[in-house]
Image (cartoon, rainbow, N blue to C red):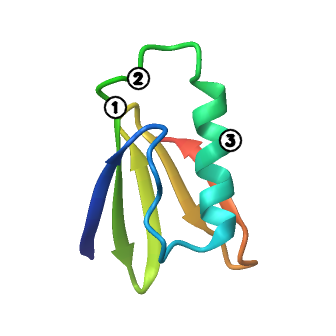
Amino acid sequence: MQLGTRWPVGGEAPARLPETVVAAIREVEAEVADLDTANWRWTLTWLEGKPVVELDDGTVIRIGPDGEATAARD
């Protein structure tokens, strides 16, 4: 596993993320828009060359074998 970066909810996602992951991030952010997320951050790590993005509330976004990004709360 390789640590990538952290950024705030609503901030610009790293440019190296696939569009499918960025779209999933925006969907999650829309779902939590009514909450106070001022101190929440996304954390990007790389596992076997694929991005894993985790929100401070435990939501994790991964790319599946089909290339699609899915979000789940761990």
SS label for mark 3: helix
Query: Residue 32's mark?
Result: none
Density class for disc 2 (Cα within 10 Å; few <14, some 14-19, many ≥20) is some
Which quadrant of the structure image shows residue 58? top left
Closer to us: 45 or 41: 41
Q: Secondary structure at mark 2?
A: loop
Q: Going by the image, does 38 lie left or right of 63?
A: left
- Picture coordinates of residue 49 (x, y %)? 42, 86
How far is the residue under mark 3 from the one under mark 2? Answer: 15 Å
Q: Amino acid at mark 1?
A: Trp
- 10 Å neighbourhood of mark 3: few (<14), some, or many (≥20)? few
Residue of label 1: 40
- Does the residue at mark 1 contact the one at mark 2 (Cβ under 8 Å)? yes
The amino acid type found where label 3 is placed reads Glu
Which image quarter: residue 61? bottom right
Three-letter amino acid code at the position of disc 2: Thr
* Distance in Å between CA atoms under marks 1 and 2: 5 Å
Residue 74 vs 49, above or below: the answer is: above
Q: Count up the numbered dots.
A: 3
The numbered dot on residue 27 is: 3
- Separation of marks 1 and 3 at Cα, in angstroms: 16 Å
- Which percent across, then down, holds residue 62? 55, 63
Residue at 43% from the left image edge and 66% from the top image edge: 14
Residue in the picture at 68% in, 55% down: 23
Label whose residue precedes the other's in the sequence (3 or 2): 3
Residue 27 image point, x, y percent:
68, 41
* Residue beneath the point at 60% across and 59% down: 22
Say which residue label 2 marks: 37
Q: Residues within 10 Å of mark 1 (few under 14, many from 20)?
A: some
Residue 21, above or below 65: above
